[in-house]
Amino acid sequence: MTPAELAVRHEVTLAPDPRRVIVKLFVPGEDAVMARTRASGLVERITALDDRAAARLLDEVMHGFGSRHDELAATFRHHFDLVRHRVSPDRELPDTMRTLIGAFFSHEYAVEGAALCNPSMVEHPDQSGLSDGQLRVAVSLRQIGEGHLSSIGFATAVIGPGGDLDLTPRHGPLVVGARVSAVHRRDLLAAGLDEEAYDDEVSATVLGLLPERFDHQEFERTLALIPPDLLHRATAQRTVEQLRRTIADSYSVLFPAQVPLDRRVLWPNNPSESNGMEDARFVRVTGEDGEPVYRATYTAYDGRQIASRMLGSADLTRFEVTPMRGPGARNKGVALFPRSVEGRQVALCRSDGETLGLTTLDGDNRWAEPVPLLRPGRTWSLIQVGNCGSPLETDAGWLVLTHGVGPMRQYAIGAMLLDLHRPERVVAELPGVLLAPAEGDRDGYVPNVVYSCGGLLHRGALWMPYGASDARVGFATVGVAAILDAMRPV
């Protein structure tokens, strides 16, 4: 049996659904190359409507779109508040008119209208109502819409017993998480300033005044304590702006507990990820208190630069977002180990863009210069190699799904084994590919790609979700014993 025959594809797939939409702010004119808002003129035309015409038009909008979204009228009123300055301050508008103006400054966005891909799979926080051999799983999804804008979505499934896979239907209006007050960390702020080479008297003063943990209000109060003599320096305002930009990289998002996981959308929430949140690699880890928590790494993209970010959540309802700092967190593809190894927090990475490496978190919360694990070398991976999610712990070692890029930019999935106690040591490697684009996988938004952001082990089987050419998400399984037997010592 060749390695490519080890993986068994399942017939069940997830396809992009253009009906899965959210409501976004829309300001006419601001999508042009030379942004010049036409908001004032639009507001004048709307407010020129008489009360009956406005009420009738709002009723039509609510009838046509109300069933597609939760709290639609509240969203319209929020969007009105964002453009309220376009209305004369001495003019009092009735609630109907304010809501209607908000409707004109709104539009639907199909979060996966272009593509659905790059999934990861973790144990779901709710394991109630299952039979023996079953496991409920949460599947994270990279969903891509108009303008190649990525966000993070979810699906739910039950796997087992055996090779059974039952996907939960994804129905109902989507909900974007609400940004809520976050607790910031001084060490991450210091690491971010260091990366941007902001080490001056202003930054040092602020870091010296801040406690280890602080909220946004305390941060602003601390800025107000900067001595005037320092604020008069030529570079002071630039440093203060950088402090605020660095703080903005950390935030929290909350979903209503009653909203099912498959209706939750993690949407870009700050400038560094304004063009997308890409390739989330979720893993279930043991927290400091011994309880299981969820972590995920993803790539933030602002249209020009990429940056590594970390998500943390106890139950996939509230998410804490923090930046990842240091040379090991550069580039894409950071994947956390599910536990510490010999007292170290370690992760896989690809900081040079083409080599799979191992990085360790140091005492200053910076990911250190990585140790190379795997370089491009086989015919199917001469362009680059990387990981396909967090390592999976087996008695034989850490099982790592890898990816390689070969001729015609074809992506395939392989595997390797790392030492349980010294993960910088490669124990064995699969001599060929585990999963390559089959004829039915080759065509899509990005052709000739199979790619995963992480699988899990369940009752002796490796369950691996994968994106097929960004056209759909498929699922494959392989026996853990079989894949280990097929590996060759390095």
Image: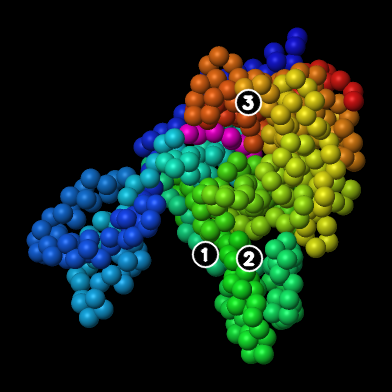
Magenta stretch containing residue 153, yes or no?
no
Going by the image, does 236 lie left or right of 212?
left
Sequence-wise first label, 3 or 2: 2
Quadrant in the rendering for residue 442: top right
Q: CA distance from mark 3 to mark 1?
A: 41 Å
Residue 125 appears in view = yes
Q: Position of residue 190 (x, y in %)?
A: 73, 68
Say which label, 3 or 1, has the lower sequence index.
1
Please give the range of residues in magenta.
115-123
Of the two numbered discs 3 and 2 in the rendering, the one whose residue sits closer to the viewer: 3
The amino acid marked with disc number 1 is Val
Q: Quadrant of residue 357?
A: top right
Residue that label 3 marks: 409
Q: Position of residue 151 (x, y in %)?
A: 51, 45
Residue 73 drawn at (x, y percent): 29, 58
Residue in the picture at 70% in, 15% down:
4
User: Which residue is label 1 attached to?
Assistant: 180
Compared to 195, does 66 lie above or below? above
Q: CA distance from mark 2 to mark 1?
A: 17 Å
